[in-house]
Image: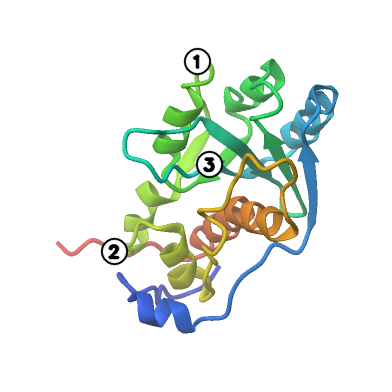
Amino acid sequence: MTTTNSFTAKISNEETAELPAIEFGGEIRIVDAERDIVEACKRLAAEPVIGFDTETRPSFRPGVTFRVSLLQLSTPTVCYLFRLNKIPLAKPILQLFENRQVLKIGADVAGDLRSLRQIRHFRDEGFIDLQTIAPQWGIEEKSLRKLSAIVLGQRVSKAQRLSNWEAATLTDKQQLYAATDAWVCIRIYDKLLHTPKKKKRS
């Protein structure tokens, strides 16, 4: 465990932009056929902690929104990209969402779960939102980009965020961006756990 907590409460966009980028270096597996869902979920269910995120095709017209296109669930070494525009939000995925033994770490978890419930209703157990717990370490930032900057000293690229997540094939850059977003949540969570929390001023 780190003996001191040197996290800053806030970080500017300029300071963040100067930091080195962080990228997922593991294996990326695309799940776009229904037959592959069970095996992917079985492997994820064997992990104590996984990273969680979603991507939605951006709408550039007011009042027009799309359903979640991609669900990312990552172990420290393998990230699964579930293409929900091609496969259903199937029961094995929902069982993972309801499994309190597997901690699912994300940022703005409530927003992602709300979007997923537009596809199919489910209960959720074992989700941890970095935005909710970060203040215990004296961190006031909410975005994943800035949480990563403060906790890990590296920035998460947002270059692909507004790309088309319903494209016939996801580009290598899209895959890496999506995988990094889920995986980095585990890295941030792990670093927080190994750092003392900020003492409240009495």
The residue labelled by disc 1 is: 121
Residue at (32, 57) in percent of width and height: 135
Decide: few, some or many residues near mark 3? Use Cα within 10 Å; few <14, some 14-19, many ≥20.
Answer: some
**What is the number of the mark on residue 199?**
2
Name the amino acid type tagged 1: His
Is 175 left, or right, of 158 in this rendering?
A: right
Dot 2 falls on a residue whose secondary structure is: loop
Name the amino acid type tagged 3: Arg
* In the rendered image, the vertical position of residue 152 relative to residue 101, given as above or below: below
Mark 1 or 2, which is nearer the eye?
A: 1
Q: Earlier in the sequence, mark 1 or mark 3?
A: 3
* In the rendered image, the vertical position of residue 143 relative to residue 38, given as above or below: below
Residue at (58, 22) in percent of width and height: 98
The residue labelled by disc 3 is: 57
Q: Position of residue 90 (x, y in %)?
A: 68, 18
* In the rendered image, the vertical position of residue 33 relative to residue 146, given as above or below: above
Name the amino acid type tagged 2: Lys
* In the rendered image, the vertical position of residue 6 relative to residue 56, given as above or below: below
Distance from disc 1 to disc 3, alpha carbons, whole Å, reads 21 Å
Q: Quadrant of the N terminus?
A: bottom right
